[in-house]
Amino acid sequence: MCQVRRMQASNPVPRLPAACLQPVPRLPTADLQSCVKVTGCRPAILCQGYRLHTCNPVSRLPTADLKSCAKATGCRPAILCQVFNPSTEEVVGSVANMGCREAEDAVSKAYSAFQTWKATTAKGRSDLLKKAYQLVMKNKEKLARIITLENGKPYRESLGEVAFGSSYIEWYAEECRRVQGTVISSPSQSKRMMTIKQPIGVCALITPWNFPLTMVTRKACAALSVGCTVVLKPSEETPLTALTLAELFREAGLPEGVFNVVTCDRDGAADIGGTLCESPLVSLLSFTGSSAVGKILLNQASGTVKRCHMELGGNAPFIVMSSADLDDAVKGALDAKFRNTGQTCICPNRFLVQEDVHDEFVKRLNIAMEKQLVTGDGFADGTTQGPLINAKAVDKVDDYVKDAVSKGAKLVRGGTRSSFGTKFYPSTVLTGVTLDMRCMHEEIFGPIIAIYRFKTEEEAIRIANATSYGLAGYAYTTDSKQQWRMAEALDFGIVGLNEGLVSTAESPHGGFKESGIGREGGIGIGLDDFLEVKYVCIGGL
């Protein structure tokens, strides 16, 4: 497939529609040089650069510009891929549409840079990351605007993501100075034994669109802090945030080739993923996304016995016991469920409410949603619920509602496509949900609260654990004994007791079962995947 893609790319540039042929200034030399440092790739692809459009967006360079660029640089013609605002459906930017060849070049450059980067001191890397953290915070409004433009989430929420994402830069800048080996008590007087920890090598990172900054910093800064180099493939839906972050890393002083970005369109994503998985120069693969795609990548990476870190799908339960403070439970439900319009991996998926507080919980929940949730464009004042990422996501959410209603569920609110635009879906509450409905078994990834009525604690635990996923779970109860029982009984890597917002840089993030392998963040744990442990035995003493 990659060979076919390269052959097609070497053909003459196709004639573009008239709408694309409006004048666009050619990128100045300085921008091209800057882009070299951002992507870590050869000039053959850098002639494209990347641009953020604020008005009259143009998705591609005119044919004449592409040809003249190819002539000037000696590279093959290439066409940019568009980045859309899911709220307005307007093109907000263009990025290089790279392929397997460019991915291989990025890996080679990262491998070369690793030979010197791994020898830098922990203090030196820490200082550089601290500078990067300061630059990110200095540019927080710019980054938040880009996140809202390409992801659609409310601007205030984007500002929150910048703060959260930057916390991982700061955290790993501090954690990397505490990486230590051990001295082992030797069984022989003539031997001394110890372990040392060393960076694993080139790390390939594949990140999703729902947190386009945080998902990058959580992975990349762990790798960079211990001396690894990075090849990042951000989501094709949200590449602009990653490229902007790369430019800030370069400004902070990160050497060329240490952090490389490979962008592509949806059609090329699988090819590039396969290239990264199969490359013998890549030592680690870290992926956040669906369990189905994660399994494909694991299989592809097995040929070179790569270390793999996976943060995959979730099907989080949200359990409300009869002893719960219902106002706290309602607040937790809104905090956990409607962040990013329900498009997070740790969003509650199945709401299990004990029968004697079921009706009151639904009543209070409906009132709170009516008062607090406002659907609209991410830049509009007061908006709390933006669009879903694309039309496919809207169709999927709507299908879950239709399936539930067809099987007897009751719509309390929402449940019909929004009038705000084709990518919007209203916050929805379903009651009378049964275990045969799809919303009880599949990851919804949208603004639906599906409520199941249960009788006993044992029933709630059994239903909560009856899933192949094990990322996050939530429970609300004021009974301290019950809190301990549920914390230990729930088969999930993250458990929130009387709390809906659980993620921090200081805590480990990861799941059980088919929700993933390994942990990100946390004291020590978040660096483990990026380090090799070497045993050293000194004899003849």
Image (tube, rainbow, N blue to C red):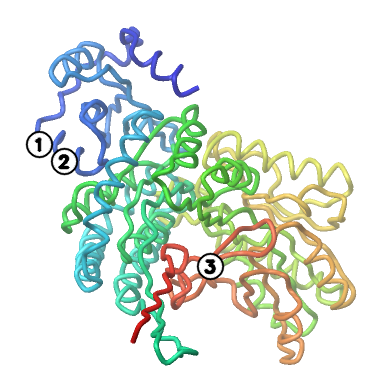
Question: What element does badge 3 sit on?
Answer: loop
Q: Which residue is mark 1?
A: 30
* CA gap, disc 3 and disc 2: 34 Å
- Amino acid type at circle 2 is Ser
Q: Pick the residue in front: 180 or 18.
A: 180
- Amino acid type at circle 1 is Ala
Question: What element does badge 1 sit on?
Answer: helix
Question: What element does badge 2 sit on?
Answer: helix
Q: Is residue 55 depicted above or below 14 in this figure? A: below
**Residue sitting at x 74%, y 44%:** 400
- Amino acid type at circle 3 is His
Q: Which residue is mark 2?
A: 34
Q: Which residue is mark 3?
A: 509
Which quarter of the figure is the C terminus placed in? Answer: bottom left
Q: Position of residue 423 (x, y in %)?
A: 54, 38
* CA gap, disc 3 and disc 1: 40 Å
**Residue sitting at x 71%, y 85%:** 483
Q: Position of residue 56 (x, y in %)?
A: 28, 27
Q: Residues within 10 Å of mark 3 (few under 14, many from 20)?
A: many
Q: Pick the residue in front: 388 or 46.
A: 46
In the figure, is residue 122 to the left or right of 83? left
**Residue sitting at x 23%, y 62%:** 132
For this orientation, the residue located farthest to the left is 29
Q: Residues within 10 Å of mark 2 (few under 14, many from 20)?
A: some
Q: Are marks 2 and 1 in contact (CB under 8 Å)?
A: yes
Q: Residues within 10 Å of mark 1 (few under 14, many from 20)?
A: few
Q: Are marks 3 and 1 in contact (CB under 8 Å)?
A: no
In the figure, is residue 201 to the left or right of 141? right
- Earlier in the chain: of badge 3 and badge 2, it is 2
